[in-house]
Image (tube, rainbow, N blue to C red):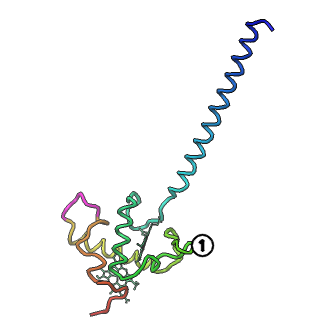
Amino acid sequence: MPPLEELKRQKTMLHRKKILTFSFIAFFISIGMAAVKSTQKERNLKVLPKDISDEKLDSIMQTYNKALGVKCNFCHVPLKGFTDSLDYFSEAEPMKENARNMMRMVININKTNFYFDSLQRPEYLNTITCKTCHRGEAFPPED
Ligand code: HEC
Ligand code: HEC
């Protein structure tokens, strides 16, 4: 083969290799992005703001445990197939909807009576909290 033809052939091969490598990398990046996306699934929130941070959500849930003297499983059912995990998204535990009604009540009391800082979200006001009535009991006595 004449040198020029040989050179051209080698260049084409190199070019093909580059395209192949690039496609491989792009493919793996897209798989990675899909995996990350699937772990950030949509939250099932009807009362709290949808853009709530994980930290804020967690700290609010911790206050429920304390105020009611319960564990997370009081309102959340176990995740199928896992012994120590709860399915926080699920609606299977009716206590979750009861808690939502209480949350709406508390937000409403604070919004109506204690909303002095317009920069605050009404959902995050905490003059009246679950603890104000519950004091560590899931079913507070009536007097
Ligand atoms: C008194 C009931 C109650 C307790 C106890 C409770 N939760 Fe929740 N949790 C709720 C309710 C109600 C919602 C849905 C709120 C809404 O609709 O805005 C929720 C939502 C969540 C979510 C969001 C789920 C999603 O759809 O993405 C997470 C995560 C969560 N809770 C974690 C916890 C953890 C962790 C604990 C224990 C530290 C806990 N919860 C204890 C009532 C409770
Ligand atoms: C104004 C007082 C008050 C506040 C504030 C309050 N609760 Fe309650 N809650 C009660 C009373 C009283 C009961 C008992 C009702 C009964 O025995 O029928 C109760 C019962 C419950 C129950 C048991 C299920 C039911 O509906 O009876 C859950 C769950 C609950 N509260 C969650 C909460 C959460 C979560 C908060 C904070 C977001 C909260 N409560 C704030 C007074 C309050």
Camera-nearest residue between 109 and 71: 71
Q: Quadrant of residue 104?
A: bottom left
| Residue type at numbered disc 1 | Lys
Would residue 122 be found to the left or right of residue 44 on screen?
left
Task: Identify the main secondary structure in magenta.
Answer: loop
Q: Quadrant of residue 68?
A: bottom left
Q: Residue furthest right?
A: 1
Identify whether 104 is placed above or below 35.
Answer: below
Would residue 35 be found to the left or right of residue 52 on screen?
right
Q: Within the magenta stretch, is there residue 120?
A: yes
Q: Quadrant of ligand 2?
A: bottom left
How far across and down, in percent of the image, does residue 120 sit? 25, 60
Camera-nearest residue between 61 and 7: 7
Identify whether 131 is placed above or below 36.
Answer: below
Q: Which residue shows up at 61% across the image and 36% down it?
A: 25
How far across and down, in percent of the image, does residue 41 sit? 52, 58
Q: Which residue shows up at 49% across the image and 69% down it?
A: 88
The residue at which mark 1 appears reads as 80
Camera-nearest residue between 94 and 53: 53
What's the magenta region? 116-121
Camera-nearest residue between 103 and 138: 138
Label 1 crowding class (10 Å Cα cut-off): few <14, some 14-19, many 20+? few
How far across and down, in percent of the image, does residue 90 sit? 52, 71
Identify whether 48 is placed above or below 31.
Answer: below
